[in-house]
Image (cartoon, rainbow, N blue to C red):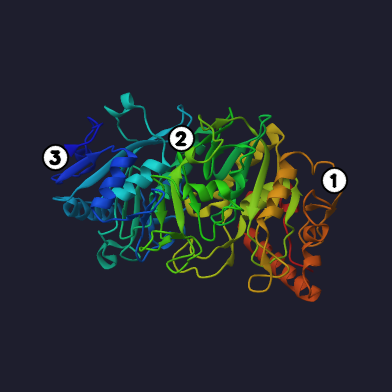
Amino acid sequence: MQQLGPYISSHGIENHGIQNVDVAHWNYSAAALFEEALRRHEGNASPGGALVCHTGLNTGRAPNDKFIVEERTSKDDIAWGSINRPIDKAKFDAVHKRFMAYLQGRDVFIQDCFAGADQEHRLPVRVITETAWHNLFARNMFIQPKPEELADFEPGFTIIQSPSFHSDPETDGTNSEVFILVDHERRMVMIGGTGYAGEIKKSVFSIMNFLLPAKGILPMHASANVGPNGDSALFFGLSGTGKTTLSADSSRTLIGDDEHGWTDDGLFNFEGGCYAKVINLSPEAEPEIYATTRMFGTVLENVIMNMDDRSLDLDDASLTENTRASYPLSYIPNTSETGLTGHPKNVIMLTCDAFGVLPPVSRLTPDQAMYHFLSGYTAKVAGTERGVKEPSATFSTCFGAPFMLRHPTVYADLLGKKVAEHGTDCWLVNTGWSGGGFGVGERMKIAHTRAMVNAALDGQLAGVATRADPNFGMLVPESCPGVPADVLDPRNTWKDKDAYDAAARHLRSLFEENFAKFEKNVDDKVKAAAIRAAA
C-alpha cells in the first residue's frame, strides 16, 4: 500500500479494517483534491473555480436507509423508532467485511478533522472516501486541525463512504442498496450506495447530538450569528427554511450556518464550512452565498453547468430542487475566526408553512417556545429528501428529528433551562407561503423576512403593540419597519377568507394530533401553551 500526503497519521487506516488499498491519499489540501477530482473525471471546473459534481440517483438524504447498531453502550439512551432504526451488530460486521474487501486495490482519500470549535468539547473525526470530491466536501465542512495535531491524529469517530458499494437488502437487513450504518461502540459510520455528500455531514451531526447532552450541552440544528454589540442569535429550522440565508447577514458576524452547541459558556459551531441550498439563488437577494458559487474550491452539487461556455444555471432544477454549495465558512464576509460566541439574546424558530396561515413573525413566551421546539412544524421542501417533489406539511421535533438520537424531551428540557437561565427572547418566523397555501399563494419575500428578523434582533419589535393570533395564540406585532402592515396578518393576505379559516382549522388539528405523543412528558405550562383543534 502506497501512502501519500502532507500529513500521514501514525494511527493508520488498518485500525478501521482497511487493508491493501492501492494508494491512501492523506489530508490533501483543497487544491490537491480539486486536481485529483478533475483528473479522475469526478466533476468539472466552473469559470470561478468551483467543482461541479453530480450525485446520480440520490440527490438528497435517504432517511429510510439509516440504521444504528443496537449495542450495550448506547442502546438504553437511543429513542428507537421509525427514525432511529436498529440493526443487528452481526449485520453491521458483515457489511463492513464486504466493504473492506471492496476497497482493496482501490484508492482512498483520508481527511482528518474536528467537529466542534470548542476545544473542550470537539470530536476528532476521520472521513475516508473513495472519491476525491467527497473528501474535498469533508475538508470544506469540518474544522481543520493544526499541522502538529495531524501526525498522531486518532479519530473519535470514523466515517467510511463509497457511492459505488451497495448493500444487499435481503442479506444485510437494509431497506435498499443505499445504507448509512452507525456503530457507537465501534465509533464508525459506513455510508454506501449514494453520492449525496450531505450524508457525511449529517452523520457527524447525529453523533454530536448523541454525545453532547450527556455533558449538559444542547446540540442544535441551528445557525448562529452575533451583532456588533455582542448580541448573538440562534436560527432553528430545517433545510429550505432560510437558516443559511438569514444568518449570512453582512451586518452581523456569522458563527455558523447549521449546527451548534450551547454550553454553560455560550455557543460554538460544529463545522468549518457551510452547505447551502442554491436553487434560484440570486446575487440581489443573497449576495454573500451567491458569491461562493464563483469561488475556488466550492463544491457545487447537482448544479447545472453549460459545458460549452461553463456558465452556471442556478435556476435549473432538472436534476433536483436540492442543489447545494459546500464552501469554507471563511468564504462568507464577516465570519467568526473562533466559531465561538456568548449566550444568545434571541432565538428565532423558522418554519416554512405550506398552508400559508401562520403569521410571518410572532413572539413566543418561554412555554410557547418549548412547545414549538418540540413540534418543529415546517414543510419538507422539494428535493431535500429522496422522493419529495413538492412542499408538504411535516413535524420534525427539535427542528431536526432525523438527526436526534435521544428522546426529544432531552433536547427540549435543555433548551428550556438555557432560555430561562439567560433570559433569551424567542420568535417564530414563517418563511413559507402568504396569500394562500402552496400552489395558490406566494413564498414570503426574502426582503420582508429579513426586515422582520432584523427588527427582532435590533429590539425594534420589543415596544411594538401586539395581538394574540386567534388561531395559534402567538403574539403578532401590529407593525414592523420595512414590512407592509397587511403582510403581518396572514388572513388579510388571502382573497378567500373562508378558505383561510378552513386551512387554519386544519393546521390546528395537525398541531394537536402531533403533540399528543409529548403531553405525558411535559409540564402543565407547556401543555397550556399547546395549539388545540377548533371546538
Residue designated by label 2: 116
Looking at this view, is 516 or 307 the one in front?
307
Q: Are marks 1 and 2 in contact (CB under 8 Å)?
A: no
- Say what amino acid the circle numbered 2 marks: Gly
**How much space separates mark 1 and mark 2, taking CA atoms?**
38 Å
* Circle 1 SS class: loop
Please, which residue is most extreme toward the right here?
465
The residue at the point 19 percent across, 39 percent down is 14
Q: x and y percent of residue 335 in the render?
A: 54, 35
Looking at this view, is 207 or 277 the one in front?
277
Looking at this view, is 25 or 152 the one in front?
25
The residue at the point 24 percent across, 55 percent down is 95
Residue 7: name its quadrant.
top left
Lower position in the chain sequence, tag 1 or tag 2: 2
* Circle 2 SS class: loop
Residue designated by label 1: 464
